Image (cartoon, rainbow, N blue to C red):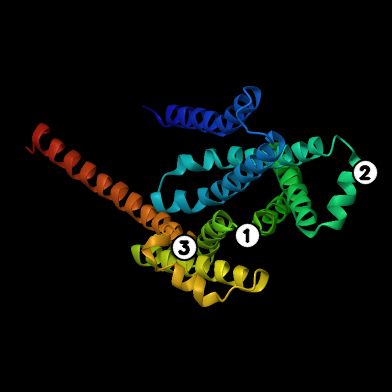
Amino acid sequence: MSTQQKIFWLRLATLIGLCLPALELAWRWYTDELGPRPVTVATHATGDWAVIFLLLSLAMTPLRATLDWMPLVHIRRRIGVAAALYAGAHLLIYVLDQKWNLIVVATEIAKRFYLTIGFVALLALAALAVTSTNGWQKRLKRNWKRLHWLIYPAALLAIVHFFIQSKVKIGEAAFAAGLFAWLMLWRVLPPRLRTSYLGLLLLAAGATLAAVIFEAAWYGLVNGIDPMRVLAANVDPDLAPRPAQKVLLASLAVIAIVAARRGFAVANRLWTKRYIQRTIPTS
């Protein structure tokens, strides 16, 4: 299979994968499987997927570098646009929940901090999605990269919004924050460490610790819970899996995937070398 064919099938699979959550949610809504409060469930689901795709779009650059697989660059834009679309659907369903009363919606966004930062994140994602085309890249030139640095504060605001709307059950938000920490720490590592096993192990430790700190700080500052109880919960097997443990598993999974890909590449080179030696005469 040629490189162009691989890129075509990768793009197609990505497009299908990005559409599946929306199609599944629409089908469940149509068949009355979202429970007594379908609008609330749909609002939370679209918000969750917006965060997931936002983190995936940020993960494409580290994955491309660590896996040494350039085709990943061809799907980063699609995933980022999907994050913006799901965030837009998140707001649209909220407007539906308010019976399309835009005055009430605007008032709520202005009054409630978590809605304000969520709306700011949405505006940033919308700007990035609109200017993600090659045409806008040519028009903006150097300013295009500067504009697209907004992805980082937008992701941070989205995760803070996730924390606040989660209220007491912040497990998924803390997990997302730990993954975001991994993605940001990778970007500040020295280039030589970004693709090394030592660097990936340091990232695993740093992101896991960050998830613990985020969770303990949130429970301590917002709910008045002793942070030591949260720290103890992370080593209690009866309470597994905790957000930090899931971040650690995800980090180790990255290392395992990188090791498998590199091992396969080495085995493929050795097999090719032996095949050439056996089939091509030396004299």
Point out the frontmost of discs 1 and 2.
1
Image mark for residue 192: none
**Is residue 147 shown above or below 16?**
below
**Residue 202's quadrant in the figure?**
bottom left
Query: Which element type, helix, strand or loop, lies under badge 1?
Result: loop
Is any atom of residue 146 visible in this view? yes
Q: Label 1 crowding class (10 Å Cα cut-off): few <14, some 14-19, many 20+? A: few
In this rendering, position of residue 230 left or right of residue 272: right
User: Hey, which residue is sitting farthest left in the picture?
Assistant: 283
Q: Which of marks 3 and 1 is in front?
A: 1
Q: Which mark is residue 244?
A: 3
> On the image, which quarter does residue 102 sit in?
top right
Estimate the x, y position of residue 224 in percent, counting from the top left: 64, 73
- For marks 3 and 1, the one nearer the N-term is 1
Q: Where is mark 2, residue-wise?
A: 103
Quadrant showing the C terminus: top left
Q: Where is residue 148 in the image (x, y as percent from the top left)?
A: 68, 52
* Residue identifier under label 1: 168
Label 2 amino acid?
A: Ile
Quadrant for the N terminus, please: top left
x and y, in percent, of residue 41 in the image = 65, 39
